[in-house]
Amino acid sequence: MTVHTATLGALRLHPNVAVRPEPFGALAYHYDTRRLVFLRHPQLVDVVHALHEHADLDTTMDALGVAETLRGPFQRAVANLAEACIVITRDSEEDRS
Amino acid sequence: MAPHENSITDGSVDDAPDTGAEQTIEDELELIEEISIDGMCGVY
Amino acid sequence: MTKLADQMKRGLDAPICLTWELTYACNLDCVHCLSSSGRRDPRELSTDEAIAVIDELRRMQVFYVNIGGGEPMLRRDFFPIIDHATTSGVGVKFSTNGTYIDTDAARRLAAMDYLDVQISIDGADAATNDLVRGQGSWDTARRAMDALAAADFGEFKISVVVTRENVTQLDDLLAIADSYGAQLRITRLRPAGRGADTWHQLHPTDAQQRDLYHWLLERGDRVLTGDSFFHLNALGDPLPGLNLCGAGRVVCLIDPVGDVYACPFVIHDEFKAGNVRDPGGFASVWNSSDLFAELREPGSAGACASCGAYDACQGGCMAAKFFTGLPLDGPDPECVSGHGAAALAAATTAPRPDQDHSRARARAAAAAVPVTLGRR
C-alpha cells in the first residue's frame, strides 16, 4: 500500500525516532518498532527535520529550495517513511501521545 | 530495441545522454533503505 | 553489493548496534560457547564502569545494544544496568538461558520499555537441545518462555544456533516460536570459543546448508538471522540483511573486562582493538584503533577474486576462517562452491582461542562431543 503524501497534510518526525547524521544522509531508528532506515540524501534529512514547521511536504520542500528533479524521489521517500511511522501526521493520535 | 535505432529520437528526458548528476539521481531513486536492526552480522 | 553496503564497509562514526558481554560467569557449559564462559573474570567492569559505558553509547547515538555473556542475569547489577540503558535512549536486547527468569523477573521485564528478551535453545526437543546445552537446560528455557508468556511480556525472541543436529528441526522450531507468539532467530555456528573444539562435528553439511538457504528464502520475513548466513548468498538471491561482515564497521563487541573486539566471534588478541578503560574510552577505540582502521580499508578478494560468487558472498565470515586456520583473503570453510573444503584439507594449524573461562566440566563435555553426538 503506497501512502500518497498529498493526502497526509501536516507532518512531523515521530517523537520516538532518533536521527543520526551520516556522510550519506542519516540513520533513523524507531525505538518502538525497532525499524532502522537509511535516509540516503542529506537534503532529505533536512526536509524530514523541517516538516513540523510547515503546512505540508510540498511547502517544506519549497522552503528548503528542493530541486524539481528531487521532488518525486523525496515524495516517494516520505511516503515510505510514513508507512514505517518514522514520519506521522500532526494532530494524529501518535502526535498527541 | 533494434541495434541501429537512435535512442535519442523519442524525446524522453531519460533517453538523453546521461550527465553525472542525472545518473546519480537515477541511481539513488530509492532514497530510503530499510534494514532490520538484526540485519547486521556480528551481533548476538 | 549496493553502494550503501560499500559505505557501510568503510565504517561509521559509531556502531549502529553492538554486542556487550556483561560477564563470563555462566551456570551452563554449552559445548559450543563462543565466549568459553563459565567462571567469572575478577577484572569485570564495575557497576559504575558499566553505567559509564552506557552513557558513552548514548552520546555516540548507538541505538541498540545486544547484551549477553556468559549468563548476563548472573550479574547482581543486571537490572540496574539494563534499566539505565533503556531509560537513557539505548535499546536493549539481552540473550539468556532463562535460568533466572522466574515469575517475578518475568513481570519486572514485562514492565520495561525498549527491552527485548532472547531465550537460547539449540533444538526442538530436550534430547537435541540438551546434547549441546546440558541436561535440564531445555526444561529451564521452556519454563522461562512460559513465565514471559504468563507475564504478558509480548513478543520475545527464541535464538537457535544451527547445527547438523537441529537443522532438520527448523519447522518444529518455528512452530514453538509461533506457539508463544515469539520470533524465531537462527544463527550460524562459528568455530569460536569452545566452538573451536566442536565445530567440525557440529557444523551443517553442504547439503544441509542448501536446504537451510532455501528454507530461509521462503521465510525471510518471519525468521531473523542476525545476517549470519550471508555466505549462503552465493546460492542465489540474497537473504535479507546488509550481507556483509559488520565487524569493526557497524558492530563490535565489548567484553566483560572492557576489551573491545571486532565481533563476538573473534575473541582473540588478533582482533582486539583496545579497552574501554583506556583514555578516551569506547569512542576512542571505535574511532582511532589501528585494527578497526584496517578492517575499514577496502579488502582484497585475494584467492576469491576469480570467483563469480564473490560479490554475493563477500568471501564469508572472518571468524570462521580465522579459527579453522584459513587465510582471511580466501574462501570461507563452508564456501557453498566447495572451495573452503579444499582449503581446509590444506590447513595445517588453527589459532586457539586465547581465553578460556570454562569450568572443568565444560572442557570435558566439549571433548566428549564426538561420542555424545554420534547417533545417526
Image: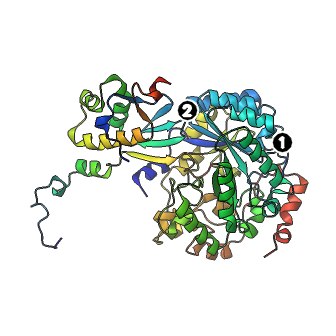
Image x and y of residue C184, in percent: 64, 53
Q: Is residue C376 above or below residue C45?
A: below
Residue C367 x %, y %: 85, 65
Q: Is residue C258 or residue C71 the one in the foreground?
A: C71
Total numbered badges shown on the rendered structure: 2
Query: What amino acid is at disc 2?
Result: Met
From the viewer's perspective, is B28 left or right of B11? Answer: right
Q: Secondary structure at mark 1?
A: loop
Q: Which residue is mark 2?
A: C60
Q: Is residue C32 left or right of residue C264?
A: right
What residue appears at the point 79 percent right and 40 percent down from the top-left corner?
C101
Callout 1: chain: C
Q: Is residue B30 something that shows in the picture?
A: yes
Residue C222's disc number = none
First in sequence: mark 2 vs mark 1: 1
Q: Are marks 2 and 1 on the same chain?
A: yes
Residue C168 spot, x, y in % from top left: 68, 69
Q: Secondary structure at mark 2?
A: loop
Q: Residue at x 40, y 38 (%)?
A: A82
- Classed neighbour count for the residue bearing mark 1: other residues with Cα under 10 Å, few (<14), some (14–19), many (≥20): some
Task: Tell me if A48 is positioned left or right of C235 in this view.
Answer: left
Q: Which chain hosts label 2?
A: C
Depth check: give the residue in front, C303 or B27.
B27
What residue does disc 1 label?
C40
- Percent of width and height locating residue A31: 54, 35
Image position of C120 with respect to C351: above or below: above
Q: Is residue C150 left or right of residue C252?
A: right
Distance from the alpha carbon under mark 2 to that under mark 1: 29 Å
